[in-house]
């Protein structure tokens, strides 16, 4: 489902941003 993929992508990019800001 596109909505599920979008939610997963948002979660991944948020996690990436978290790691990026906390290194």
Image (cartoon, grey):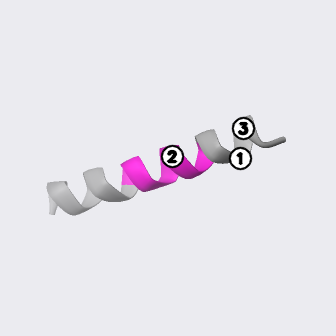
> In terms of image quadrants, where is residue 18?
top right
Query: Which region shows up in magenta?
Result: 9-16
* Residue depicted at x 15% and y 63%: 1
The answer for how far apart the CA atoms under marks 2 and 1 are is: 9 Å
| Callout 3: SS | helix
Q: Residue furthest top?
A: 21
* Residue depicted at x 77% and y 42%: 22
| Callout 1: SS | helix
Q: Quick one: label 2, few (<14), some, or many (20+) residues within 10 Å?
A: few
Q: Label 1: which residue?
A: 19
Q: Quick one: label 3, few (<14), some, or many (20+) residues within 10 Å?
A: few
Magenta: main secondary structure: helix
Q: Label 2: which residue?
A: 14
Q: Label 3: which residue?
A: 20
Residue 16 in the image: above or below residue 7: above
| Label located before the other in sequence (3 or 2) | 2
The answer for how far apart the CA atoms under marks 3 and 2 are is: 10 Å
> In terms of image quadrants, where is residue 8?
bottom left
Say if mark 3 contacts mark 2, CB within 8 Å.
no
């Amino acid at each position: 489902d596109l909505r599920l993929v979008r939610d997963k992508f948002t979660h991944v990019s948020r996690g990436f941003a978290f790691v990026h800001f906390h290194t």
